[in-house]
Amino acid sequence: MIKKLLLCGANGRMGQAIESIATMHDFEVAHPIDLGDDASEVIMDCDAVVDFSFRDATLPLATLAASHCKPMVIGTTGHTKEDREQIIRLSVKIPVVWAGNFSTGVNLLFFLTQQAARVLDEKSDFDPEVIEMHHRMKKDAPSGTADRLLEILKDSRGLSDQQVRHGRSGMVGERSTKEIGSHALRGGDVVGEHTVMFAGIGERIELTHRATDRVIFAAGALKATKWVLAQPPGLYSMQDVLGLKI
Protein backbone atom coordinates (compact mmCIF):
# COMPACT_ATOMS: atom_id res chain seq x y z
CA MET A 1 0.00 0.00 0.00
CA ILE A 2 1.35 3.41 -1.01
CA LYS A 3 2.00 5.77 1.92
CA LYS A 4 1.83 9.54 1.64
CA LEU A 5 4.76 11.73 2.64
CA LEU A 6 5.02 15.35 3.63
CA LEU A 7 8.53 16.21 2.42
CA CYS A 8 10.08 19.41 3.74
CA GLY A 9 13.06 20.57 1.69
CA ALA A 10 11.60 19.19 -1.53
CA ASN A 11 13.57 21.62 -3.71
CA GLY A 12 16.93 20.67 -2.24
CA ARG A 13 19.30 17.97 -3.52
CA MET A 14 18.12 15.38 -1.03
CA GLY A 15 14.48 16.32 -1.50
CA GLN A 16 14.74 15.85 -5.25
CA ALA A 17 16.57 12.53 -4.81
CA ILE A 18 13.86 11.25 -2.46
CA GLU A 19 11.08 12.31 -4.81
CA SER A 20 12.80 10.59 -7.75
CA ILE A 21 12.73 7.14 -6.11
CA ALA A 22 9.80 7.39 -3.68
CA THR A 23 7.42 5.19 -5.70
CA MET A 24 10.05 2.42 -5.84
CA HIS A 25 9.79 2.26 -2.05
CA ASP A 26 5.97 2.36 -1.90
CA PHE A 27 5.75 6.06 -1.08
CA GLU A 28 4.16 9.08 -2.72
CA VAL A 29 5.53 12.54 -2.00
CA ALA A 30 2.01 13.90 -1.73
CA HIS A 31 3.04 17.21 -0.21
CA PRO A 32 6.44 18.58 -1.28
CA ILE A 33 7.04 21.80 0.65
CA ASP A 34 9.92 24.17 1.18
CA LEU A 35 10.87 27.30 3.08
CA GLY A 36 7.86 29.57 3.51
CA ASP A 37 5.21 26.93 2.80
CA ASP A 38 2.55 26.26 5.44
CA ALA A 39 2.76 22.61 6.49
CA SER A 40 -0.29 22.93 8.76
CA GLU A 41 -2.55 22.95 5.70
CA VAL A 42 -1.50 19.45 4.64
CA ILE A 43 -0.21 17.73 7.79
CA MET A 44 -3.37 15.65 8.23
CA ASP A 45 -3.14 14.24 4.70
CA CYS A 46 0.11 12.31 5.16
CA ASP A 47 1.35 9.15 6.84
CA ALA A 48 4.79 10.48 7.79
CA VAL A 49 6.87 13.66 7.74
CA VAL A 50 10.37 13.75 6.24
CA ASP A 51 12.62 16.77 6.87
CA PHE A 52 15.69 17.60 4.78
CA SER A 53 15.41 21.35 4.95
CA PHE A 54 17.03 23.97 7.19
CA ARG A 55 17.79 23.77 10.90
CA ASP A 56 15.40 26.63 11.72
CA ALA A 57 12.51 24.77 10.09
CA THR A 58 12.88 21.47 11.95
CA LEU A 59 11.54 22.40 15.39
CA PRO A 60 8.30 24.03 14.14
CA LEU A 61 7.73 21.07 11.80
CA ALA A 62 8.44 18.52 14.55
CA THR A 63 6.07 20.37 16.89
CA LEU A 64 3.36 20.21 14.23
CA ALA A 65 4.02 16.52 13.54
CA ALA A 66 3.84 15.70 17.26
CA SER A 67 0.56 17.56 17.68
CA HIS A 68 -0.95 15.42 14.88
CA CYS A 69 0.78 12.14 15.88
CA LYS A 70 2.73 11.83 12.62
CA PRO A 71 5.97 9.79 12.62
CA MET A 72 8.99 11.75 11.48
CA VAL A 73 12.36 11.25 9.80
CA ILE A 74 14.92 14.05 10.20
CA GLY A 75 18.01 14.38 8.05
CA THR A 76 18.62 18.06 8.75
CA THR A 77 21.68 18.89 10.87
CA GLY A 78 23.35 21.92 12.45
CA HIS A 79 20.71 22.66 15.10
CA THR A 80 21.45 24.61 18.25
CA LYS A 81 21.67 22.65 21.49
CA GLU A 82 18.40 24.19 22.67
CA ASP A 83 16.51 23.29 19.48
CA ARG A 84 17.90 19.76 19.54
CA GLU A 85 16.78 19.24 23.13
CA GLN A 86 13.27 20.46 22.32
CA ILE A 87 13.01 18.18 19.29
CA ILE A 88 14.19 15.22 21.37
CA ARG A 89 11.51 15.96 23.97
CA LEU A 90 8.87 15.74 21.24
CA SER A 91 9.91 12.15 20.54
CA VAL A 92 7.98 11.04 23.64
CA LYS A 93 4.85 11.68 21.56
CA ILE A 94 5.91 10.31 18.16
CA PRO A 95 8.59 7.98 16.75
CA VAL A 96 11.47 9.97 15.25
CA VAL A 97 14.45 8.69 13.26
CA TRP A 98 17.13 11.36 13.34
CA ALA A 99 20.41 10.79 11.51
CA GLY A 100 23.16 12.85 9.96
CA ASN A 101 23.68 10.20 7.30
CA PHE A 102 21.17 7.64 5.97
CA SER A 103 23.57 5.54 3.91
CA THR A 104 23.67 1.87 4.86
CA GLY A 105 27.42 1.82 4.21
CA VAL A 106 28.14 4.86 6.39
CA ASN A 107 26.16 3.41 9.28
CA LEU A 108 28.11 0.19 8.92
CA LEU A 109 31.26 2.38 9.08
CA PHE A 110 30.00 3.79 12.39
CA PHE A 111 29.49 0.26 13.71
CA LEU A 112 32.92 -0.96 12.55
CA THR A 113 34.59 2.14 14.00
CA GLN A 114 32.97 1.40 17.37
CA GLN A 115 34.27 -2.15 17.21
CA ALA A 116 37.79 -1.13 16.17
CA ALA A 117 37.95 1.64 18.77
CA ARG A 118 37.16 -0.86 21.53
CA VAL A 119 40.21 -2.93 20.58
CA LEU A 120 42.50 -0.06 19.55
CA ASP A 121 41.97 1.98 22.72
CA GLU A 122 44.32 4.46 24.41
CA LYS A 123 46.54 1.60 25.64
CA SER A 124 47.04 0.15 22.16
CA ASP A 125 49.57 2.69 20.81
CA PHE A 126 47.36 3.41 17.78
CA ASP A 127 46.69 7.06 16.87
CA PRO A 128 43.17 7.80 15.51
CA GLU A 129 42.60 10.32 12.71
CA VAL A 130 39.47 11.17 10.69
CA ILE A 131 39.71 12.42 7.10
CA GLU A 132 36.70 13.50 5.05
CA MET A 133 36.16 15.04 1.62
CA HIS A 134 33.12 16.68 0.06
CA HIS A 135 32.22 18.82 -2.93
CA ARG A 136 33.30 22.45 -3.14
CA MET A 137 29.79 23.75 -2.36
CA LYS A 138 29.60 22.23 1.13
CA LYS A 139 29.48 25.00 3.72
CA ASP A 140 30.16 23.26 7.03
CA ALA A 141 33.20 21.38 8.29
CA PRO A 142 33.63 18.83 9.62
CA SER A 143 30.68 17.03 8.07
CA GLY A 144 27.91 15.55 10.21
CA THR A 145 29.25 12.09 9.43
CA ALA A 146 32.78 13.06 10.47
CA ASP A 147 31.37 14.56 13.66
CA ARG A 148 29.72 11.23 14.48
CA LEU A 149 32.96 9.34 13.83
CA LEU A 150 34.83 11.77 16.08
CA GLU A 151 32.18 11.29 18.76
CA ILE A 152 32.68 7.51 18.63
CA LEU A 153 36.44 7.92 19.00
CA LYS A 154 36.11 10.48 21.80
CA ASP A 155 33.77 8.20 23.73
CA SER A 156 36.10 5.22 23.32
CA ARG A 157 39.06 7.16 24.76
CA GLY A 158 37.28 9.43 27.22
CA LEU A 159 38.39 12.57 25.37
CA SER A 160 36.67 15.95 25.07
CA ASP A 161 35.91 18.28 22.16
CA GLN A 162 39.00 20.29 23.12
CA GLN A 163 41.18 17.26 22.38
CA VAL A 164 40.10 17.07 18.73
CA ARG A 165 42.77 18.71 16.53
CA HIS A 166 41.16 20.22 13.44
CA GLY A 167 44.08 20.31 11.02
CA ARG A 168 47.66 21.13 11.93
CA SER A 169 49.78 24.11 10.97
CA GLY A 170 53.10 25.50 12.16
CA MET A 171 55.25 24.20 15.02
CA VAL A 172 52.54 22.24 16.79
CA GLY A 173 54.98 19.83 18.46
CA GLU A 174 54.78 16.07 18.65
CA ARG A 175 51.40 14.41 18.36
CA SER A 176 49.87 13.79 21.77
CA THR A 177 48.43 10.36 22.55
CA LYS A 178 45.39 12.19 23.93
CA GLU A 179 44.21 13.80 20.72
CA ILE A 180 42.22 12.89 17.62
CA GLY A 181 43.05 14.48 14.28
CA SER A 182 40.22 15.79 12.09
CA HIS A 183 40.84 16.86 8.50
CA ALA A 184 38.29 18.27 6.03
CA LEU A 185 39.03 18.34 2.30
CA ARG A 186 36.82 20.22 -0.18
CA GLY A 187 36.80 20.18 -3.96
CA GLY A 188 35.06 19.25 -7.18
CA ASP A 189 31.80 17.32 -7.05
CA VAL A 190 32.73 14.68 -4.44
CA VAL A 191 29.52 13.36 -2.89
CA GLY A 192 31.24 12.20 0.29
CA GLU A 193 34.29 10.25 1.44
CA HIS A 194 35.15 9.36 5.04
CA THR A 195 38.17 7.50 6.40
CA VAL A 196 38.93 6.53 9.98
CA MET A 197 42.63 5.77 10.37
CA PHE A 198 44.28 4.00 13.29
CA ALA A 199 48.03 4.58 12.82
CA GLY A 200 50.26 2.26 14.81
CA ILE A 201 53.94 1.45 14.82
CA GLY A 202 54.70 -0.62 11.74
CA GLU A 203 51.06 -0.95 10.70
CA ARG A 204 48.01 1.12 9.89
CA ILE A 205 44.30 0.27 9.76
CA GLU A 206 41.92 2.32 7.60
CA LEU A 207 38.13 2.09 7.41
CA THR A 208 36.79 3.97 4.39
CA HIS A 209 33.40 4.71 2.87
CA ARG A 210 33.00 6.45 -0.49
CA ALA A 211 29.65 7.68 -1.79
CA THR A 212 29.35 8.19 -5.55
CA ASP A 213 25.61 8.84 -5.87
CA ARG A 214 23.31 10.85 -3.60
CA VAL A 215 20.52 8.36 -4.24
CA ILE A 216 21.98 6.05 -1.55
CA PHE A 217 21.04 8.61 1.09
CA ALA A 218 17.54 8.98 -0.34
CA ALA A 219 17.05 5.20 -0.34
CA GLY A 220 18.20 5.03 3.26
CA ALA A 221 15.85 7.82 4.30
CA LEU A 222 12.90 6.01 2.71
CA LYS A 223 13.94 2.75 4.39
CA ALA A 224 13.97 4.63 7.71
CA THR A 225 10.53 6.08 6.95
CA LYS A 226 9.04 2.66 6.25
CA TRP A 227 10.61 1.36 9.49
CA VAL A 228 9.48 4.26 11.70
CA LEU A 229 5.83 3.81 10.70
CA ALA A 230 5.73 0.65 12.80
CA GLN A 231 7.58 1.98 15.86
CA PRO A 232 6.34 3.31 19.21
CA PRO A 233 7.21 6.88 20.23
CA GLY A 234 10.91 7.44 20.85
CA LEU A 235 14.13 8.75 19.35
CA TYR A 236 15.86 6.37 16.94
CA SER A 237 18.95 6.36 14.70
CA MET A 238 19.86 4.53 11.51
CA GLN A 239 21.71 2.08 13.73
CA ASP A 240 18.28 1.10 15.07
CA VAL A 241 16.79 0.90 11.58
CA LEU A 242 19.58 -1.40 10.38
CA GLY A 243 19.81 -3.48 13.55
CA LEU A 244 23.39 -2.40 14.21
CA LYS A 245 23.00 -1.37 17.84
CA ILE A 246 25.72 -2.83 20.03
Image (spheres, rainbow, N blue to C red):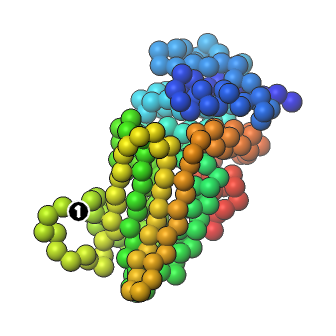
- 143, above or below 55, in the image: below
Residue 22, image x and y in percent? 72, 30
The residue singled out by tag 1 in the image is 168
- Quadrant position of the C terminus in the picture: bottom right
How many dots with numbers?
1
Residue 73, image x and y in percent? 61, 38
The residue shown at (35%, 53%) is: 184
- 18, above or below 178, in the image: above
From the viewer's perspective, tell me whether residue 215 is left or right of residue 114: right
- 51, above or below 238, in the image: above
Q: Residue furthest right?
A: 1
Foreground: 2 or 132? 132
From the viewer's perspective, tell me whether residue 225 is left or right of residue 37: right
Q: In this view of the protein, can residue 153 be seen by the observer?
A: yes
The residue shown at (37%, 76%) is: 127
From the viewer's perspective, tell me whether residue 246 is left or right of residue 176: right
Foreground: 179 or 66? 179
Q: In this view of the protein, can residue 235 be seen by the observer?
A: no
Residue 216, image x and y in percent? 64, 43
The residue shown at (40%, 63%) is: 130
The residue shown at (57%, 55%) is: 106
